[in-house]
């Protein structure tokens, strides 16, 4: 029997898992427990891991599958390209990590043809106030939709256009994409409702950051539909806000949740997070409800 225990984070989704030390090898039995909790709950919190090394973070992450190396290679941790650094900290006149980009709800790497399975985010430094990560369950959001909207979305494909989105939102902050980065992020389409490959549960898979339109629908009509659906998904009562402590690790399932960073005083406080990103599969359309 696993000695691990859990407590809920939000009525709709999320669990804290107690009893793990990721500086030590995790037994197959404990890992099976974590993996199931993660897939079913969407978000899993493990506290008290301030003592672990980047190699421990990477080794634990690899248990879930192969890891991504982010297209923004300038923000990879030197010597550990599996770790994507997210930070507002400037050293020697340059940002040490990706900054300012995640204030809107998204699922990591949703714009790739094989979006990420999940991300494992470790807090190294955080402000005392603000800088929380907020999460919503896209499985719960799907369940909350009116029947007609649920049926309509199940038949749709959403068109992701990373370069279009980056030009509009990020180019001024981070500088333009290189030709190589553009080549790695062609326009692609995903089903708007996907079936979770481990649990079978249907979840919305949409983005108001990267989705430009739905296939067969013009941009204005697409954006209106997207706004309608996202307003339901992002309702304040649907949100779990995680207030970070150094040593916290949160695993989120990119197949069934979205997340965003909450505002904080980026001028006067430091936020330093390490993320590993687990490679995923091509999304599969959920069966009509
Ligand atoms: Fe993210």
Image: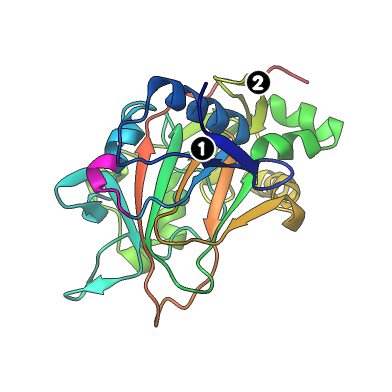
Say what secondary structure mark 1 lies in.
loop
Q: Is residue 216 visible?
A: no
Q: What percent of the width, then of the height, locates residue 124?
A: 35, 60
Q: Who's the residue at 64% across and 53% down the image?
A: 240
Q: Residues within 10 Å of mark 2 (few under 14, many from 20)?
A: some
- How far is disc 2 from disc 1 in space, using C-alphas? 16 Å
Q: How is the image coloured?
A: rainbow
As drawn, the label of residue 254 is: 1
Q: Who's the residue at 19% across and 45% down the image?
A: 80
Q: What percent of the width, then of the height, locates residue 33?
A: 51, 26
Q: Nearer the viewer, residue 40 or 53?
A: 53
Q: Nearer the viewer, residue 276 or 14?
A: 14
Q: Who's the residue at 80% across and 39% down the image?
A: 144
Disc with the residue nearer the chain's start (2 vs 1)? 1
Q: Nearer the viewer, residue 230 or 140?
A: 140
| Above or below, 42 relative to 86 | above
Say what secondary structure mark 2 lies in.
loop
Q: Residues within 10 Å of mark 1 (few under 14, many from 20)?
A: many
Asked if the residue at label 1 sits under 8 Å from ligand 1, the reply is no
| Above or below, 201 relative to 57 | above
Residue 139 lies in the magenta stretch: no
As drawn, the label of residue 167 is: none
Region rendered in magenta: 51-56
Q: Which residue is mark 2?
A: 286
Q: What percent of the width, then of the height, locates residue 276?
A: 34, 42
Q: Who's the residue at 32% across and 30% down the image?
A: 62
Q: Nearer the viewer, residue 136 or 20?
A: 20
Q: Is residue 93 visible?
A: yes
Q: Decide if residue 152 is on the left or right side of residue 100.
A: right
Q: What percent of the width, then of the height, locates residue 250?
A: 48, 47
Look at the numbered discs 2 and 1 and tell me whether their residues touch, using CB distance below 8 Å: no
């Amino acid at each position: 029997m696993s000695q691990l225990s859990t407590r809920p984070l939000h009525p709709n989704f999320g669990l804290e898992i107690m009893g793990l030390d990721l500086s030590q090898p995790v037994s197959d039995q404990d890992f099976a427990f974590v993996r199931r909790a993660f897939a079913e709950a969407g978000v899993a919190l493990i506290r008290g891991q301030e003592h672990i090394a980047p190699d421990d973070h990477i080794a634990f992450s690899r248990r879930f599958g192969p890891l991504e190396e982010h297209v923004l290679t300038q923000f990879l941790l030197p010597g550990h390209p599996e770790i994507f650094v997210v930070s507002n900290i400037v050293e020697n006149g340059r940002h040490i990590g990706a900054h300012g980009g995640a204030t809107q709800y998204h699922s990591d790497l949703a714009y790739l043809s094989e979006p990420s399975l999940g991300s494992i985010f470790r807090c190294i430094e955080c402000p005392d106030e603000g800088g929380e990560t907020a999460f919503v369950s896209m499985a719960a959001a799907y369940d909350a939709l009116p029947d007609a909207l649920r049926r309509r979305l199940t038949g749709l494909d959403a068109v992701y256009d990373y370069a279009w989105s980056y030009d509009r939102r990020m180019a001024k902050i981070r500088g333009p994409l290189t030709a190589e980065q553009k080549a790695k992020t062609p326009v692609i389409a995903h089903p708007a409702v996907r079936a979770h490959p481990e649990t079978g549960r249907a979840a919305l898979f949409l983005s108001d950051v990267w989705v430009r339109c739905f296939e067969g629908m013009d941009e204005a009509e697409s954006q209106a539909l997207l706004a309608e659906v996202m307003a339901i998904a992002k309702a304040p009562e649907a949100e779990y806000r995680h207030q970070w402590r150094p040593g916290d690790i949160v695993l989120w399932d990119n197949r069934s949740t979205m997340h965003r960073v909450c505002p904080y005083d980026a001028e006067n406080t430091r936020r330093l997070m390490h993320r590993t990103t687990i490679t995923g599969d091509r999304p599969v359309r959920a069966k009509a409800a």
